Amino acid sequence: MTKRNSETLSDPELGMHRVIPRRDFLNGAALTIGSALLPDAHHPQNSKSSAEEAQDRPGYNPPLSTGLRGSHPGSFETAHSLRDGTFWKNAPSPQPLSEKYDLIIVGGGISGLAAAHFYRQRAGTNAKILILENHDDFGGHAKRNEFHLGGKLQLLNGGTMLIDSPTPYSAEAAGLLNKLGIDPVALDKTYTDRSLYRSLGLGTGVFFDRETFGSDCLVKTPRGIEEDGSSSGSADAHWQTFLENSPLSLAARRDLLRIETQSVDYLPGLTSAEKKDRLSRISYKDFLLNIAKTDPGVVTFYQTRTNGEWGVGIDAEPALDCWALGLPGFQGLNLEPGAAPHMSYSGAGYTNGGSPRFHFPDGNASIARLLVRNLIPAAVPGNSAEDVVTASANYAQLDSPDSPVRIRLNSTVVRARNLPDSQNPADVEISYATGRDVFSVRGKACVLACWNMTIPFLCPELPEKQKEALHYLVKVPLVYTSVALRNWTAFQKLGVSNLYCPGAYWNSVSLNWVVNIGDYKSPRSPEEPILIHLSRTPCKPGLPAREQHKAGRMELLVTPFEIFERKIRDQLARALAPGGFDPARDIEAITVNRWPHGYGYEYNPLFDPDWPPGQAPHEIGRQRFGHITIANTDSGATAYTDVAINQAYRAVSELM
Ligand SMILES: Cc1cc2nc3c(=O)[nH]c(=O)nc-3n(C[C@H](O)[C@H](O)[C@H](O)COP(=O)(O)OP(=O)(O)OC[C@H]3O[C@@H](n4cnc5c(N)ncnc54)[C@H](O)[C@@H]3O)c2cc1C
């Protein structure tokens, strides 16, 4: 146990003066390769900018960029002006390109890349495919953060973290992984090291922040050492020690101990099915307060436990889904295993097991890179799931006229339309903005693998009902931050490898996964530099889930890098200073992956109706529109890589 009543540190003490690569694009200093040219995206008087060709320049390697990443400045302004109705007022008429494609795909995430793969499977490898992506990198949420610390490559996921789904991968999704050389079970068994941190005595801890809990305090959790949840000795005794060291009130400690360790039937007289039904209609917060009758301090302790899964706290998540996720308090209810009606996709899935799990060092960016290798072999050299981790991508090969598949980055699609039958019955015309130019290009068909809520702006001719349905899908905002540290001796001294931070700005802080795959080796000694992962899910507890996501998105759009940086330095200092951590000395680099449009929206039984089959917004929204079909996880109403692939498969099948 470690305690510290820290004072607020000054900017110099936090290291805000330190020279690290910083980019506060909100203040207009967009330095990202390629995106530097985008803010002027539609000034008719300007000559053709080189934004489109930026990816061909030597040294172009977006994963190396630090500062504000994710939906980086330069990637979204065009789409927002389209949404606001200002784009076409200022834009030049699209210049028609002479290129012709069999398929044009909007969105270079896993769904878009998988759509290209499935199309080639059916149409043949000579099929001409263009993928247009508004970010400066491919992969969508599956983004790679790359650092070279002390001369050694270190990787983290900037978004999509791992192969892990509440349901087993479908034949199509598993088949695609197999084709790419990914066997998650074998990879996990061979390359994931779950013993290193444990062997050093590190486990999980809770950081109680003074704004929420009265004093700053880091306490190792009772299950600190054992990742599987087991602990030596009496669980009660471990919890008691933990609680005594916490700043929680006596009443909160008493009730938390009960919730964690005692088997109480809080709904006596009901069958398992009746209990499940009841729990599916109330939040976990309500369950704790009104059914288990706990002190409100218990709610504060668990408030953000669901944020990583659904992007909102326990005020907006059904108790039954929280049972499925493994939150405590249900031990004595004798609920039968398995899903019940009126559960979320993830909640229902997790009760029945799930998919295998594997984390590549850069998360599912390795899947995106393997897909690109499959589509354009010259762009990502190598031939195995192992060697892709350290392979250097050659971005100059992505949009080569010699390749049947081309990936064009920094290109925001602004219109997708079926051409009138009189012109050519099988033609679509796609317009996109890049740099200061707007181009149009034709194809026989189009898959929109982009965020579904942008589609009404790209295709204003869609039926009103479909547009309304597409707007319903509010994506979940998230921030995943990678921080490079000089060493991790503070973590070692404090005995923690990851922290749950219930009230703090960053909900969690963790040392990087230990994965040794191919030529990639994770750090082993606490004296070595390391990457840590911090996550934040901005939301507004008390509002309905979709309103919370909208509020969180607004927050992200107005938060400059400097604020994120100060929050990182401040929280790490307050949690880790007792272990000798000095933010001014120990932080080497920061990459804030800001995802205002993060997870695909998953229906929440507390707020969304049970739609009749075929009538849910994602089903109405994803209807084929002439030669245009719709993919992306949004059209599966959830946020998993297997769903991105499944939706790509469906969208391509609808075209063929
Ligand atoms: C922080 C985070 C963590 C996640 N972790 C996991 C995880 O661990 N496991 C998991 O299975 N899933 C995870 N997910 C879910 C993830 O969304 C999916 O797994 C998958 O990567 C989504 O792929 P996609 O292609 O459907 O969408 P995206 O990855 O969002 O790709 C769509 C692309 O289309 C682009 N686009 C949008 N509009 C336009 C336009 N007008 N013109 C051109 N391009 C456009 C977007 O910018 C984007 O790059 C995570 C998501 C986030 C945000």
Image (spheres, grey):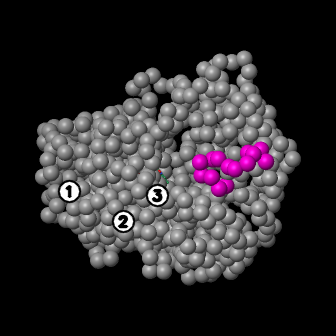
> Label 2 is placed on what type of residue?
Gly
Q: Which residue is mark 1?
A: 405
Q: Which residue corresponds to the image point at 81% horizontal and 67% vertical from the top-left?
A: 5
Q: Residue 88, percent across and down?
A: 35, 54
Q: Which residue corresponds to the image point at 61% horizontal and 44% vertical from the top-left?
A: 306
Residue 245 vs 69, above or below: the answer is above
Which quadrant holds the C terminus? top left
> Label 1 is placed on what type of residue?
Val
Chief secondary structure of the magenta portion: loop
User: Disc 1 vs disc 2: Cβ atoms closer than 8 Å?
Assistant: no
Task: Mark 3 or mark 2: name the one nearer the start of the chain.
Answer: 3
Q: Secondary structure at mark 1?
A: strand
Residue 520 shows in this picture? yes
Q: What range is drawn magenta here?
A: 224-237
Specify whether 533 is left or right of 155. right
Q: Residues within 10 Å of mark 1 (few under 14, many from 20)?
A: many
Q: Using the numbered discs, state the Cα–Cα distance from disc 3 to disc 2 in whole angstroms.
A: 12 Å
Q: Using the numbered discs, state the Cα–Cα distance from disc 1 to disc 2 in whole angstroms.
A: 28 Å
Specify whether 556 is left or right of 201. left
Q: Residue 391, percent across and down?
A: 32, 68
Q: Which mark, residue 518?
A: 2
Q: Which residue corresponds to the image point at 41% horizontal and 38% vertical from the top-left?
A: 168
Q: Residue 481, percent across and down?
A: 54, 63
Task: Mark 1 or mark 2: name the one nearer the start of the chain.
Answer: 1
Q: Which residue is mark 3?
A: 192
Specify whether residue 503 is painted magenta: no
